[in-house]
Image (tube, helix red, strand yellow):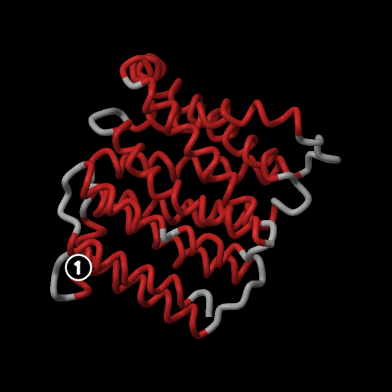
Amino acid sequence: MWTVYVALLGRILLLGYEKIVVKQLSEGEKSTPSAFLFFGIASLSLLPLLPFIPSPTNYNFLYKVVGSSFLYTIANIFYVKSLSIGEASLVAPLYNLNLLFLLVLTTVFLGEKLTLFKIIGILLLIYGASLLGERKDIFTSIGILFREKATLFMILASLFTATGRTIDGGAITGVHPIIYAFYINLGITIFLLIYAMVTGSLVDIWDLFKRKPKIATLSGFINSYSYLLLLIAFTRIDVSIAVPASMLGTLVTIILAGKIFKERIKSRFLAATIMVGGVWFLFL
């Protein structure tokens, strides 16, 4: 059992650093090429592990992979765009809002219990998010988050991510996490490739990789193994617990954003800490 908690800790640290790397990759760039490299390299990084994993007895899970991959594709276009135009310490905490959507979805579709403590946790998450709007009136603050493109994009990314996580929670049973992670990343890569072809962004993908090969490769490795660690956690920990715990990576992001990008993080750290407090209520 201890291995799943180690996996969860690794997920937290990698997820916190991931947002910094994605911002470095996508800042000043189009979102589609950045997202394609983020997932395309992630798929390639998992290939060396596949020969050591027994093949699935059946591939029925691929039906759910297609649906989940499509949702993640939409989510990550918003995710990359948000980080490319917004400050990491501002938009990263809003990723925590996928818990609001996740708890509703897992209660309805996976039969997980929505307790009083979880409701309190959600309220803390919403209040913490309101502080990011930097207005005294909570409703005005929340309204600002929905009006600004960078913050709105991250909220939308959270919604689609939560929907995909709900599918993952039901599909991972009986499938090796490495197999599932590979097919998810491959599915997202294919969807992004189709989108790039439609929007005429194929040349931009190669151009971006030539200019930022190291950061693109690093982003892909972090993406694949961060997600793999989450899937490992899913094998023994409820989705509605494993995903909220991952949100602790937000604090890692804010600290790094202050050091690397010199962002003002004092008030945002407080907001994120309150949101993390909401996470802990989900464990009670």
- Label 1: how many residues lie within 10 Å, few (<14), some (14-19) or many (20+)? some
Name the residue rendered at 74%, 54% in the picture: 173
Where, quadrant-wise, is the N terminus in this rendering? bottom right
Q: Quick check: 9 above or below 38? A: below
Taking depth in this image into account, of 266 and 106 the one nearest to the observer is 266
Q: Quadrant of residue 242?
A: bottom right
- Give the amino acid type for the residue marked by disc 1 in the picture: Ser
Residue 203: image location, x then y, percent: 38, 14
Assign a secondary structure to mark 1: helix
Asked whether 10 or 40 is in front, the reply is 10
Q: Mark 1 sits on what residue?
A: 141
Query: Left or right: where does residue 111 sit relative to residue 121?
Result: right
Q: Is residue 116 above or below residue 135?
A: below
Image position of 57 with respect to 106: above or below: above
Residue shown at 50% from the left, 33% from the top:
221
Judged left or right of residue 184, residue 14 is: left
Give x and y (percent) for residue 101.
47, 64
**Residue 207, image x and y in percent?**
34, 15
In the rendered image, residue 191, in percent from the top left (x then y), is placed at: 53, 31
Between 235 and 195, the residue placed more toward the observer is 235
Q: Residue furthest bottom?
A: 116
Residue 99 vertical placement versus 191 (above, below): below
In this rendering, position of residue 123 left or right of residue 194: left
Rendered residue at 49%/25% (across/down) = 193
**Residue 115 location, quadrant:** bottom right
Q: Residue furthest right?
A: 57
Number of dots carrying numbers: 1
Residue at 59 percent across and 71 percent down: it is 107
